[in-house]
Image: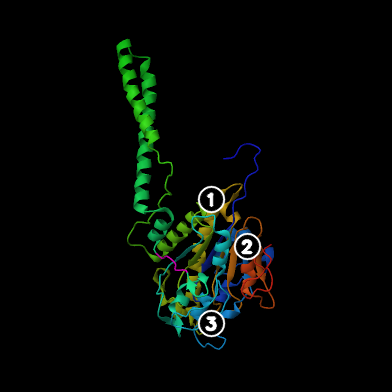
């Protein structure tokens, strides 16, 4: 709350980077038309509900994702280059080298005022050592966030552990929440008692009025004790299902998105990365009617059934993303909602999983970043501009002073 006539302080912008593995069925991903005439295809149809808050980019690429003489290993490169736009050294040992990721550049310059400079989460933990893809270390396949060229930032894949890191022991928080509910219930009982006592007072004789006064004095003492017992730092409510031991993949993803929302809305951090799967993830999506592994399907050979199965997975990921963004619009922050003060990017480091190409990548962005961005529908670029141009624009919006990032050539317009 602010005194009258006080100029409200503009909330600090947030940035969220979401990575989806194995590329997309691009034929069903890519929108038709552009601007206000954009028509979303089957995969992006859920975006219709947030049309006025979204921009879909076509034509952006990450040149560092290609082999450049290093042979196979595109899935590892698609992860390692997704936010660094730098070519990783092909190694299975400790001599890692790729680049500093855009989220960590932002965290170093803009994250200092938050309890956590950045938050890294994912759906799969994955190994940090060994070889996961054609001679590339598992560190490349399992981390999009890099603090230094040789230092990946490990993500957390357990929702309970994420909550504990951000807000403390979830069981203790749940206990405090129950205590608050008990206090509220007791107060409601006291309100009823006091109302009944007021009605009763006029009907009593002198002696009984004295007894009633003594009784009400004890009620007031309880009321004071309840007021004094209120925790001045009420814990963030524990998300439903967080403490359940058995959760399906979809439920766990929803929990992760909920935790990201809590982290942003409570200003625990301003920068988040979320990996929906590790590089080359071969997860089965049986709950979607897709029993085959995702990575296996990505080598579709243009077979219709495989392409349709990939589109189902793509659509699921977009639906979960849209639900998250819609929740952001319900979080009021100053004169605007949380999404107005955020930039949420969703995409992949591979375009077509069968071709393993790193140009014309699927990428979209929601939110206005505190006024620097505006929904543009579908924007298609000619000349294969680097993805780093988009990241440089996000960096600037977050308050970074850098003139370049990786192989950027200019600041990509966000309006």
Residue behind mark 2: 400
Judge whether residue 49 can be spotted in this image: no
Specify whether residue 376 is in view.
yes
Name the residue beneath numbered marker 1: 331
Q: Left or right: where does residue 254 sit relative to residue 48?
A: left
* Label number found at residue 192: none
Marked residue nearer the N-terminal end (1 or 2)? 1
Residue at point 59%, 54% (across, down) = 12
Q: Which residue is mark 3?
A: 356
Does 101 lie within the magenta span?
no
Task: From the viewer's side, name the closer residue of 147 and 253.
Answer: 147
Q: On the image, which quarter does residue 131 sit in?
A: bottom left
Look at the picture and state if 369 lies above or below 291.
above
Residue 153: x and y, percent? 47, 69
Helix, strand or loop status at disc 1: loop
Local SS, label 3: loop
Q: Mark 2 Cα within 10 Å, few/some/many (few <14, many 20+)?
A: some
């Amino acid at each position: 709350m602010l005194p009258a006539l006080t100029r409200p302080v503009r909330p600090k912008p947030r940035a969220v980077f979401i990575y989806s593995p194995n590329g997309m069925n691009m034929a069903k991903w890519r929108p038709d038309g552009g601007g206000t005439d954009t028509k979303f295809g089957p995969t992006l149809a859920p975006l219709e509900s947030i049309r006025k808050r979204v921009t879909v980019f076509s034509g952006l690429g990450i040149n560092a994702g290609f082999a450049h003489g290093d042979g196979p290993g595109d899935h590892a490169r698609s992860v390692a280059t997704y936010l660094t736009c730098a070519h990783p050294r092909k190694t299975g040992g400790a001599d890692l080298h790729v680049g500093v990721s855009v989220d960590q550049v932002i965290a170093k310059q803009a994250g200092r005022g938050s309890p956590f400079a950045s938050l890294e989460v994912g759906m799969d933990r994955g190994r940090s050592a060994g070889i996961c893809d054609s001679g590339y270390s598992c560190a490349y396949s399992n981390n999009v966030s890099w603090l230094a060229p040789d230092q990946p930032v490990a993500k957390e894949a357990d929702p309970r552990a994420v909550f504990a890191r951000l807000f403390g022991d979830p069981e203790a928080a749940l206990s405090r929440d129950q205590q608050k509910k008990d206090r509220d219930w007791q107060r409601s009982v006291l309100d009823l008692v006091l109302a009944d006592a007021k009605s009763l007072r006029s009907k009593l004789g002198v002696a009984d009025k004295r007894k009633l006064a003594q009784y009400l004095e004890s009620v007031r003492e309880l009321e004071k004790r309840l007021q004094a017992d209120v925790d001045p730092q009420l814990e963030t409510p524990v998300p439903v299902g967080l403490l359940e031991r058995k959760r399906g993949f979809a439920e766990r993803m929803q929990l992760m998105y909920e935790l990201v929302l809590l982290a942003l809305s409570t200003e625990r951090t301003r920068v988040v990365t979320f990996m929906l799967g590790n590089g080359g993830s071969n997860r089965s999506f049986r709950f979607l009617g897709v029993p085959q592994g995702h990575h296996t399907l990505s080598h579709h050979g243009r077979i219709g059934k495989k392409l349709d199965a990939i589109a189902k997975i793509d659509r699921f990921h977009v639906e979960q993303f849209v639900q998250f963004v819609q929740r952001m619009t319900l979080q009021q922050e100053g004169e605007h909602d949380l999404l107005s003060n955020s930039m949420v990017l969703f995409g992949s480091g591979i375009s077509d999983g069968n071709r393993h190409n790193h140009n014309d990548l699927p990428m979209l962005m929601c939110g206005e970043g505190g006024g620097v961005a505006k929904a543009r529908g579908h924007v298609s670029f000619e000349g294969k501009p680097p993805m780093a141009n988009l990241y440089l624009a996000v960096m600037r919006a977050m308050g970074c002073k850098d003139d370049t990032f990786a192989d950027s050539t200019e600041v990509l317009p966000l309006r």
